[in-house]
Amino acid sequence: MTSRNVPMVPQAQRHGKPADPRPKPAMLTTPASPIRFRRLLLTGAAGNLGRELRPRLKAYCDVLRVSHRREFGAAGAGEEVVIAALEDKSQVFKLLEGVDAVVHMGGVSTEQTWEAILAGNIVGMVNLYEAARHHKTRRIVFASSNHVTGFYRQDEVITPQHPPRPDGFYGLSKAFGESLAQLYWDKHSIETVSLRIGSSFAEPKDRRMLATWMSFDDTERLVVAALTAPVVGHSVIYGMSDNATVFWDNTSARHVGYRPQDSSDKYRAAAEARQPTIDATQPAAKYQGGAFVTQGPFFEETSK
């Protein structure tokens, strides 16, 4: 039998539909836990990490409810899509109905105006926790940030017990979120794992990220550990892979059960080639928060 070079046509195109140009996210070959939930909620599902976690979390639940503040596509198999603005209390209360646990990736994720951060990360957090209390949702995995402690120096190794030193309104809002999580644990027995996420990208972009980088696979491992650990109360853990260069010591959070499997070391040569020299006198090179320490404050312009 002779073979012919026949171009492979995606099935969607054979039926007259354009192929989805987006690459399919990689998945762990073996789920990080056999535990399954009836319904999980993923907020911020259209954000960078939300898009990565959306297909991955389906391995751990019967139904994945995904939300964002704007339209972001139709529901896939095993999904429910809900449009909800975190600052809208009634929308958030409906969003958490029937949910077993929440992976909260929503809100503002960079240094923006105070007004935007106030709405998404402060008012929105209060709405989320009040909805969780109302619906008796017992576990929240909160995407906090390393920018809660961004003004510690890069030549220090700190723990989750060090006092917050936020590097802007964004980091300040995440420190508020952690304090709110502690309040709702102490007062209402809602458990939270606050993930002080470092830099979750396909690979480190610069030399700072050799310390802060967390692979997408390790991000899945961390989120699943935070969802399934037997007892967490309110725990704080830094989100990083098993990197040789470190700013943070997670020893106090080992009860969460997160064991990273990846490392930034294999990208070290490329990162150092892109950034062969560093001006250590610049704040972005001096402090753990990097460029965030020089940004803001920003406010919406008001008409005079």
Image: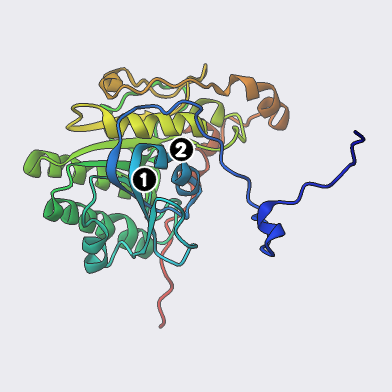
Q: Locate residue 283 relative to residue 121 in the image: left or right.
A: right
What residue lies at 28% left-to-right and 40% top-to-bottom?
Answer: 37
In this view, which residue lies farthest toward the bottom? 304
Quadrant occupied by the C terminus: bottom left
Residue at which label 2 appears: 289
The x, y position of residue 13, in whole percent, is 70, 58
CA separation, marks 1 and 2? Answer: 9 Å
Mark 1–mark 2 CB contact (< 8 Å): yes
Asked whether 165 or 58 is in front, the reply is 58
Rendered view: 27 above or below 180: above
Q: Which amino acid is tagged 2?
A: Gly
Q: Locate residue 61 relative to residue 183 in the image: left or right.
A: right
Rendered view: 226 above or below 105: above
What residue lies at 40% left-to-right and 27% top-to-bottom?
Answer: 32
Q: Evaluate whether residue 178 shows in this view.
A: yes
Residue at which label 1 appears: 171
What residue lies at 43% left-to-right and 53% top-to-bottom?
Answer: 45
Location of residue 240 (image quadrant): top left
Q: Helix, strand, or loop for circle 2?
A: loop
The x, y position of residue 209, in whole percent, is 55, 31
The x, y position of residue 58, in whole percent, is 41, 42
Q: Helix, strand, or loop for circle 1?
A: helix
Rendered view: 166 above or below 236: below
Q: Evaluate whether residue 148 shows in this view.
A: no
Quadrant occupied by the N terminus: top right
